[in-house]
Amino acid sequence: MITAIIIDDEAKGRLALRQKLNSYCPNVNILAEAVDGIEALAAIEKLHPQLIFLDIEMPKMNGFEMLNNIKEKKFQIIFTTAYDQYAIKAIKYAAFDYLLKPVDIEELKTAVSRADNSENQQTKKQIELLQQNMEHPKKQLNKLAIPTLEGLLFFDINDIIHLEANSNYTFIHFSGNPKITASKTLKEFEEILPESIFFRTHHSHLINLNYIKKYIKGDGGQIEMQDGTYIDVSRRKKEEFLKAIGY
């Protein structure tokens, strides 16, 4: 069983989440509910849950402020939110799970399953990364937590040269660091990495435009990257790619 606390200022939101957890996630034991960050701090200190469902926007003390007030963050976090696209992107960059309200049952089951299979060691580092990214809401997000089979690794996106699909995993090639295997699909990375920097040239490749060394003309063409790798451009992507590099 996973012990959990629901933290949400809306009674309807707490009730809906509790009912869905009771019906579809029988391995979750809800220890308590809290209506704001202040109540949540007391409940966490007293009950030591393994998992918290945390609403971002709350009166008195929001979800991020509450996390700032916890020294020992020995629990998993699943964020819940109704809006705020920037916050959602920052949450994704820190590799946290989040649930959009109204909560989708399949997404809930997936998030709970991931929490059940995760270690708590990285939570503190993830929160630090999330807070760094939330400090400047209009700034380009740069720090990214990347899940691997060994745990979370933290990188600057500007050090990524290119990403390569490998079934449900992704090979990520860096400048100055060895290649890693991420336990996310290429599509998931494409959805969060900025379009102004990263371009999907092919169903198997996502490249950092800043690391292009040369474009070789052809049916779709081929790109030589600064690390010496050659990457194909699909025919249907050729025109869009040439526009992206101002050709």
Image (spheres, rainbow, N blue to C red):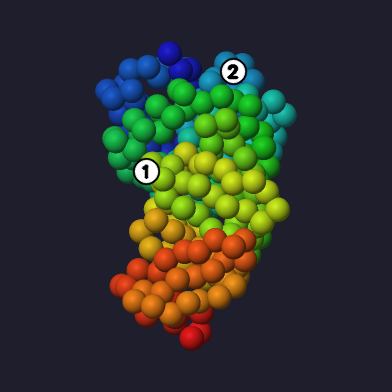
Residue underneath mark 1: 167
- Disc marking residue 140: none
Distance between mark 2 and mark 1 Cα atoms = 38 Å
Residue at left 34%, top 30%?
109
Q: Residues within 10 Å of mark 2 (few under 14, many from 20)?
A: some
- Residue 159 visible? The answer is yes
Name the kind of residue labelled 2 in the image: His
Residue 129 placed where, x, y %? 65, 45
Query: In the image as oriented, which residue stretches furthest toward the top?
Result: 1
Residue 99 placed where, x, y %? 40, 41
Left of 137 or right of it: where is 236? Answer: left
Left of 123 or right of it: where is 206? Answer: left
Left of 234 or right of it: where is 69? Answer: right
205 vs 167: above or below: below
* Camera-side residue of 221 and 94: 221
100 vs 230: above or below: above
In primary-sequence order, the first of circles 2 and 1 is: 2
Q: Residues within 10 Å of mark 1 (few under 14, many from 20)?
A: few
Residue 51 placed where, x, y %? 51, 25
Quarter of the N terminus within the rendering: top left
